[in-house]
């Protein structure tokens, strides 16, 4: 249930959580009474959902400390999503001091239950050496677990591991294969990297038109580097510039003619 997650390590993602009316009532009344919010009969999922409500300020006043306590209760009952979110809070230092060892511990509990996001985040921690000794081989193992469950971030990272030969034998061909898996899920960074492979002829015949096609996919999603590379291809006469618009941001575009005029000034 990815939509109930809080603040992944790479980017923030807070979405509303729907609670039953009885849980909302219990939470609101607890604000004034300081009584126990939930009884021993509530399920771990209900406890977790209430924690998300407190984290997000959804139907109850936002309270990170209460969110943390509720996640802890659900996590202690083996609820994987709560374990994952505890890891995030320890990583970000939300309602608790930053503690990367605790982050890793809670991510691992969730990952061992097959939680894809936790598996991916453990891969990141091993790759960057956060809370653990840097180990590209272990990073790769966790990325593969997450990638095989459909994580496009993990798929893109595996492509980069093969591109640079980190933890694996260097292979542009395998890098392309993994980038394509992520690109099929509209990961703009993967689309950008595929364009780079075609522009430079790494693992594929050099093809500026295909490079442009992939750069455009990324640029259409607001990737500025992809727009920059399209501009470079045009200014170096590598592709036909007919009908091409280069974007400086997602909202504001300028034509190649504008670009040429600015360079000639």
Image: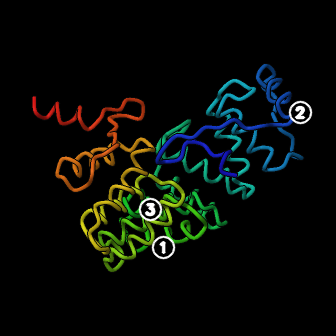
* Secondary structure of the residue carrying numbered label 2: helix
- Depth check: 143 or 231 in front? 231
Q: Which residue is mark 1?
A: 141
Q: Is residue 190 left or right of residue 31?
A: left
The disc placed on residue 22 is: 2
| Labels 1 and 2 touching (C-beta < 8 A) | no
Q: Is residue 12 left or right of residue 218?
A: right
- Within 10 angstroms of label 3, few (less than 14), some, or many (20 or more) residues? many
Residue drawn where x is 40% and y is 76% of the image: 174
* Secondary structure of the residue carrying numbered label 3: helix
Residue drawn where x is 72% and y is 47% of the image: 73
Pick whichever of labels 1 and 2 is earlier in the sequence: 2
- How far is mark 1 from mark 2, CA to CA? 43 Å
- Depth check: 134 or 194 in front? 194
Residue drawn where x is 43% and y is 59% of the image: 125
Residue 143 location (% of width, % of height):
49, 67
The disc placed on residue 156 is: 3
**Where is residue 202, by image quadrant?**
bottom left
Residue most toward the left? 265
The disc placed on residue 29 is: none
- How far is mark 2 from mark 3, CA to CA? 42 Å
Residue most toward the bottom? 169
Q: Is residue 124 left or right of residue 29?
A: left
Q: Is residue 229 left or right of residue 89?
A: left
- How far is mark 1 from mark 3, CA to CA? 14 Å
**Where is residue 242, by image quadrant?**
top left
Pick whichever of labels 1 and 3 is earlier in the sequence: 1
Residue 176 location (% of width, % of height):
39, 70
């Amino acid at each position: 249930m990815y939509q109930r997650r809080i603040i992944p390590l790479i980017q923030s993602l807070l979405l509303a959580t729907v609670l039953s009316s009885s849980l909302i009532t219990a939470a609101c009344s607890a604000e004034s009474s300081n009584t126990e919010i939930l009884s021993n009969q509530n399920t771990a999922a209900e406890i977790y959902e209430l924690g998300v409500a407190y984290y997000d300020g959804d139907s109850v006043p936002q309270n990170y400390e209460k969110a943390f306590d509720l996640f802890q209760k659900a996590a202690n009952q083996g609820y994987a999503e709560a374990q994952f979110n505890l890891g995030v809070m320890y990583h970000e230092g939300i309602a608790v001091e930053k503690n990367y060892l605790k982050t890793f511990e809670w991510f691992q509990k969730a990952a061992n239950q097959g939680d894809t996001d936790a598996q991916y985040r453990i891969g990141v921690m091993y790759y960057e050496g956060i809370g653990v000794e840097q180990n590209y081989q272990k990073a790769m193992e966790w990325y593969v677990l997450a990638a095989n469950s459909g994580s496009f971030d993990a798929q893109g990272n595996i492509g980069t591991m093969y591109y640079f030969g980190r933890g694996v034998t260097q292979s542009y061909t395998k890098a392309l294969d993994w980038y394509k898996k992520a690109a099929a899920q509209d990961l703009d960074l993967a689309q950008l990297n595929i364009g780079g492979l075609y522009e430079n002829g790494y693992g594929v015949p050099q093809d500026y038109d295909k490079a442009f096609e992939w750069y455009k996919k990324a640029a259409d999603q607001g990737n500025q580097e992809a727009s920059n590379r399209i501009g470079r291809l045009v200014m170096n006469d590598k592709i036909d510039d007919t009908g091409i618009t280069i974007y400086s941001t997602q909202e504001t575009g300028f034509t190649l003619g504008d670009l040429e005029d600015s360079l000639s000034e």
